[in-house]
Image (cartoon, rainbow, N blue to C red):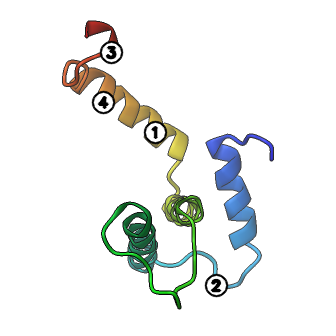
Amino acid sequence: MSEKTIQEMQQEVDKYISQFKEGYFSPLAMLARMTEELGELSREINHFYGEKPKKSTEKENTIEEELGDMLFVMICFANSLDIDLQEAHDRVMEKFQTRDKDRWTRIEEE
């Protein structure tokens, strides 16, 4: 698989969604989808790392697959609201690099 930029991923998802008359879901429906996917990710984490193993009748998913589903829904959400995720990421990283720059113990300080 080739490496893709965030913009390329957003364009790829938009091209996929744009082929359907229904288009993107509403923000509230998108939030519900994201919550649903987060629940599925939570079940996988609990299955592999927690105290609640799956029943033998439950489908075996992977954490990677569930994170992929979360990423897809997040990209859909951003696209539906015309948000550039690269810009959003850059703003968040700037915030962490300034506001939280001294919050954690750096490896070289140990």
Question: Image point 70% across, 54% down: which residue?
Answer: 11
What is the x, y in percent for residue 54?
44, 80
What secondary structure is marked by label 3?
helix
Tag 1 secondary structure: helix
Q: Is residue 101 above or below residue 88?
A: above
Please name which of the two marks, 1 or 3, marks the residue nearer to the observer: 3
Where residue 30 sits in the image (x, y, percent)?
Answer: 45, 74
Contact check, label 4 and label 1, Cβ < 8 Å:
no
Nearest the viewer among 28 and 51 is 51
Q: Which residue is mark 3?
A: 107
Q: Say whether disc 4 or disc 1 marks the residue closer to the N-terminus.
A: 1
Residue 89 badge:
1
Instruction: Give the number of the disc on residue 22.
Output: 2
Q: Is residue 41 left or right of residue 82?
A: left
Crowding around mark 4 (Cα neighbors within 10 Å: few <14, some 14 to 19, many 20+) is few
Residue that badge 4 annotates = 95
- Point out which mark residue 6 bears: none
Image quadrant where one finds the C terminus: top left
Mark nearest the camera among 4 and 2 is 4
